[in-house]
Image (cartoon, helix red, strand yellow):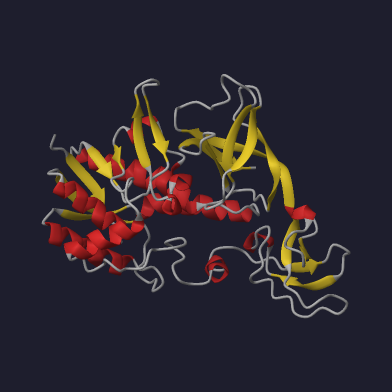
């Protein structure tokens, strides 16, 4: 049946083909470009170019096109929290927050005002109605290399009921071909990577604009001072770049890695072995959970065996998850030690066959 569908046109090739697929299916499609960052004086944020590319796609498809400004909402719900977490010496993931608070909240509300039946995005994920459970499932897509369910684990049932992922069954190579055949000018446009508001610039240089610098010592496990850091907020566990530790007398000519952060002494403890046992752990706790079904999988069985990722593109890891009573605190025990488990990052869970994204939370 013909539906009114609002597509988030980002200026990229994935959202362009998303809109084309829906137009070809005979739906009434409206293209919306979300402006999420105030880039008037920011040459590093490519939003202006992206907006032009999105408008050109809409013109090619002969569909209505609008730009909506969510910059204030993005600052309040995503960027402010991003900075707060850094000040707590944690490493947040703003892309997950953007999906939760902007794309599937503000954007969805805007689409509802346009009396849309659905919103659609160019995410590589699958939204499936399960007749047995009478719930929507967030499943992995055909193209496992482009799987974006890690960033979508916060989606709830009411959001999935209104959301389409038309790219679920396509490999990325086909998407490029479809864009080229459609005559889209952005057919060969490079995929965006990293965080929108950082753009192409150095991540640490960007943070310096917003975070207070509190320099301290970089020391070895033996306590030898080997350098200076600019502030613990600027570094994450396992990090190699930007330590700026040169040749150190008595130590090999080899890279240095952040092993731990001592907040009391304002010190970074560094090592030269990226497989240092102290970088690994079999357990973590997490909170601020979101579950696609509406409830944690530990309700019926505690603990429960699942697969999990502690970072994007990681291979699924076997683990058990235990809920602490009826609280929003969970303990995870992994079969194999995990490298550089980082507070502030997300842990995302999957069914044992790896096909269903169940939800996740913020590593504490």
Picture coordinates of residue 156, whole percent (x, y):
41, 33
Picture coordinates of residue 250, whole percent (x, y):
88, 77
Inspect this view and state whether residue 11 appears.
Answer: no
> What number of labels is visible?
0
Identify which residue, 44 or 249, lies in the foreground. 249
Residue at 20%, 43% in the rendered image: 5
Picture coordinates of residue 333, whole percent (x, y):
69, 36
Residue at 22%, 65% in the rendered image: 180
If the image is split into quadrants, where does the N terminus sit? top left
Inspect this view and state whether residue 122 appears.
Answer: yes
Q: Quadrant of residue 37?
A: bottom left
Q: Is residue 95 above or below residue 4?
A: below
Q: Quadrant of residue 160?
A: top left
Identify which residue, 257 or 319, lies in the foreground. 319
Q: Quadrant of residue 183?
A: bottom left
Position of residue 179 in the picture relative to residue 101 (left or right): left
Residue at 68%, 52% in the rendered image: 339
Position of residue 203 in the picture relative to residue 292 (left or right): right
Picture coordinates of residue 82, whole percent (x, y):
53, 53
Q: Is residue 99 above or below residue 271?
A: above
Identify which residue, 228 or 176, lies in the foreground. 176
If the image is split into quadrants, where does the C terminus sit? top right
Identify which residue, 295 or 94, lies in the foreground. 295
Q: Is residue 7 above or below residue 161?
A: below
């Amino acid at each position: 049946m013909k539906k009114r569908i609002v597509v988030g046109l980002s200026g990229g090739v994935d959202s362009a083909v998303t809109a084309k697929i829906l137009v070809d299916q005979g739906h009434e499609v409206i293209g919306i470009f979300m402006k999420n960052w105030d880039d008037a004086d920011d040459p590093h944020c490519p939003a202006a170019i992206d907006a032009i590319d999105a408008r050109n796609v809409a013109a090619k498809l002969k569909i209505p096109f609008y730009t909506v400004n969510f910059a204030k909402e993005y600052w309040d719900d995503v960027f402010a929290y991003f900075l707060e977490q850094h000040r707590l010496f944690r490493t947040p993931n703003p892309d997950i927050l953007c999906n939760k608070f902007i794309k599937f909240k503000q954007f969805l509300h805007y689409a509802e005002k346009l009396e849309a039946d659905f919103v659609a995005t160019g995410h590589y994920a699958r939204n499936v109605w399960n007749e047995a459970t009478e719930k929507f499932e967030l499943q992995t897509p055909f193209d496992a290399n482009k799987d974006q369910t890690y960033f979508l684990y916060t989606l709830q049932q009411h959001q999935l009921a209104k959301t389409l992922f038309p790219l679920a069954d396509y490999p990325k190579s086909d998407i490029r071909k479809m864009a080229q055949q459609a005559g889209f000018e952005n057919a060969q446009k490079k995929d965006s990577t990293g965080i929108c508001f950082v753009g192409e610039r150095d991540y640490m240089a960007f943070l310096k604009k917003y975070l207070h610098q509190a320099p301290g010592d970089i020391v070895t496990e033996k306590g030898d001072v080997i350098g200076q850091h600019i502030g613990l907020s600027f570094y994450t566990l396992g990090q190699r770049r930007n330590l700026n530790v040169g040749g150190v007398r008595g130590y090999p000519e080899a890279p240095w890695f952040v092993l731990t952060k001592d907040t009391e002494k304002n010190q970074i403890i560094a090592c030269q072995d990226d497989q240092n046992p102290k970088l690994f752990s079999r357990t973590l706790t997490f909170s601020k959970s979101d579950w696609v079904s509406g409830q944690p999988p530990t309700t019926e069985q505690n603990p429960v065996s699942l697969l999990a990722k502690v970072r994007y593109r990681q291979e699924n890891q076997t683990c058990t998850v235990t809920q602490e009573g009826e609280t929003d605190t969970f303990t995870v025990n992994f079969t194999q030690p995990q490298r550089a488990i980082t507070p502030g990052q997300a842990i995302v869970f999957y069914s044992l066959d790896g096909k269903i994204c169940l939800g996740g939370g913020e590593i504490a």
